[in-house]
Amino acid sequence: MVEIVEEVDHRSLEDEEAEDISYEELKKRMWKDRVRLEKYKEIRKSEEPVSLAKEEASRRKKMARAQDSILKYMVKIMEVCEARGFVYGIVPKKGKPVTGSSDSLREWWKDNVRFDQNAPLAISKYLPEVLLECPSPS
């Protein structure tokens, strides 16, 4: 076991200089630092909505890309399987529902089904029931 006999002075030159600062100078520095901190907080707050707006724009862009992919594959499936039509709808957590359909079913999808209006209501009504019926994965 090692024993340290002499005492080590941990103060650096900066600490010694700091001790030479008068009370008034220290008070003034603290006031300036407080003002600077408030400015930084304001800048940070003003930047947060920008980042939220960027996230929202990114989410919309991803949704648009996904919708394009869905339409592309649906058309391909119609050609390969000789299907007569297709419809789909996506209800995101935020924003309005996204829908798509083939030309043959578009009028029926928009006029009779009205997915844009009916889907959010149906989800709010039936989703809690479905979640209660599903066994929890444990």
Image: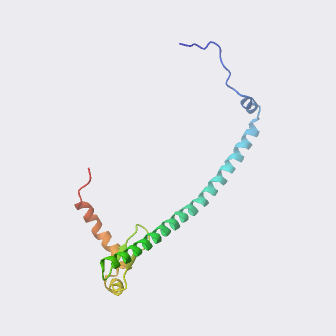
In the image, 121 versus 136, the foreground residue is 136
In this rendering, the answer to whether 112 lies above or below 27 is below
Q: Residue furthest front?
A: 80
Picture quadrant of residue 109: bottom left
132 above or below 138? below
What is the basis of the colouring in this image? rainbow
Q: Quick check: 33 left or right of 102?
A: right
The image position of residue 90, as x and y in percent, is 37, 72
Residue at 34% across / 86% down in the picture?
104
Q: Position of residue 21 (x, y in %)?
A: 76, 34
Please provide percent x and percent y for residue 114.
34, 81
Residue at 28% x, 64% y is 128
Q: Is residue 97 visible?
A: no
- In the rendered image of this protein, does residue 81 appear above or below residue 48? below
Rendered location of residue 135, percent (x, y): 23, 56
Residue 138 versus residue 85: which sits nearer the camera? Answer: 85
**Residue at horizontal 65 percent and vertical 14 percent from the top:** 6
How many numbered tags mark residues here? 0
Residue 10 in view in this figure: yes
* Drawn side of residue 6 relative to residue 104, left or right: right
- The image shows residue 28, relative to residue 86, as above or below, that is above
